[in-house]
Amino acid sequence: MAEQAEHKEGPVESIMEKISEKIHGDDHDSSSSSDSDSDTQKPASPSSVKAKVFRLFGRERPVHHVLGGGKPADVFLWRNKKISAGVLGGATAVWVLFELIEYHLLTLVSHILILSLAVLFLWSSAHSFIKKAPPRIPEVHLPEEPILQVASALTIEINWALAVLRSIASGRDLKKFLIVIVALWVLSIVGSRCNFLTLFYISFVLLHTVPVLYEKYEDKVDPLAEKATIEIKKQYAVFDAKVLSKIPKGPLKAKLV
């Protein structure tokens, strides 16, 4: 009888051992799967942190798209170095010609036309004597559609600027009013130091240097810009609390509030 009891207990014990091994195995698998899930979830945190990185002017697109994309953005970002260098060199030559040499635009255009017409006239008149084919003078026609598009775009921008000036003059936004006043004051100082051509040339050079440098070093520039933005906001909050809040509100602004 004892041998039969031991023989019966043997299969029971083996079944219990298999069940316990299966349970421990499931626990091990669930723990490993949870570890693997945690491992897979950990790398997602840097991307979410990266998505919240401060970008200058609050942009969310690359610099190329911010500049409008296409060929102008390629020129500003030096995608084709030959074209960008040629455009910048041409602008520099024009600035040197008119600003340093003090050549006048009307004089330059007149001299170019005189030289071109004289060469073409002499060539057309003497082609039979010099035994060469007469020059092929192309017919030049200005297309209407691009000119209309440019005029339409300028009209939209001018109307937008007039609407902004009207909104500022109506006293609705004191912050925007102060920003515009300071910007116009700085612009008047710059205008008194240099003429329009020099100012245009400086802006042109900045367009060909600042975006490409920012695109190259944006990871270093953006943290500094974030610190500067926070500091400016702090200083403006202090200025608002001490000065702007004490200015009496007009009737229109009181109604809006």
Image (spheres, grey):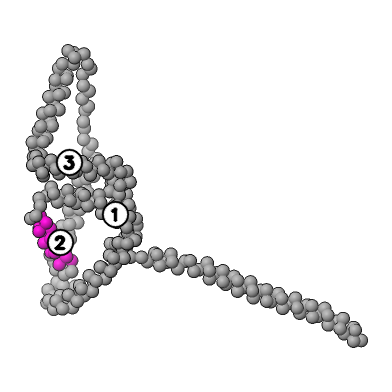
Q: Residue at x 16, y 72 (%)?
A: 253
Q: Which residue is mark 2?
A: 183
Q: Quadrant of the C terminus?
A: bottom left
Task: Relative to 72, say whether 176 is above or below.
Answer: below
Q: Secondary structure at mark 2?
A: helix
Looking at the image, residue 131 sits to the left or right of residue 49; the answer is left
* Magenta extent: 176-191
**Disc 2 versus disc 1: nearer the observer:** 1
Q: Secondary structure at mark 1?
A: helix
Magenta stretch, overall SS: helix
Q: Secondary structure at mark 3?
A: helix
In depth, the one of 79 and 143 nearer the eye is: 79
Query: What is the three-letter code of the residue carrying label 3?
Result: Ala
Q: Earlier in the sequence, mark 3 or mark 2?
A: 3
In depth, the one of 77 and 213 nearer the eye is: 213
Q: Which residue is mark 1?
A: 213
Q: Examine the image and state in which quarter residue 191 appears.
A: bottom left
Query: What is the three-letter code of the residue carrying label 2?
Result: Ala
Give the Cα separation between the discs numbered 3 and 2.
30 Å
**Are dots 3 and 2 in contact, CB under 8 Å?**
no
Is residue 257 among the parts visible in the rendering? no
**Disc 3 versus disc 2: nearer the observer:** 3
Q: Which residue is mark 3?
A: 93
Looking at the image, residue 104 sits to the left or right of residue 172; the answer is left
Q: Residue at x 21, y 49 (%)?
A: 205
Q: Earlier in the sequence, mark 3 or mark 1?
A: 3
Give the Cα separation between the discs numbered 3 and 1.
23 Å
Q: Residue 111 at what x, y percent from top left? A: 10, 32
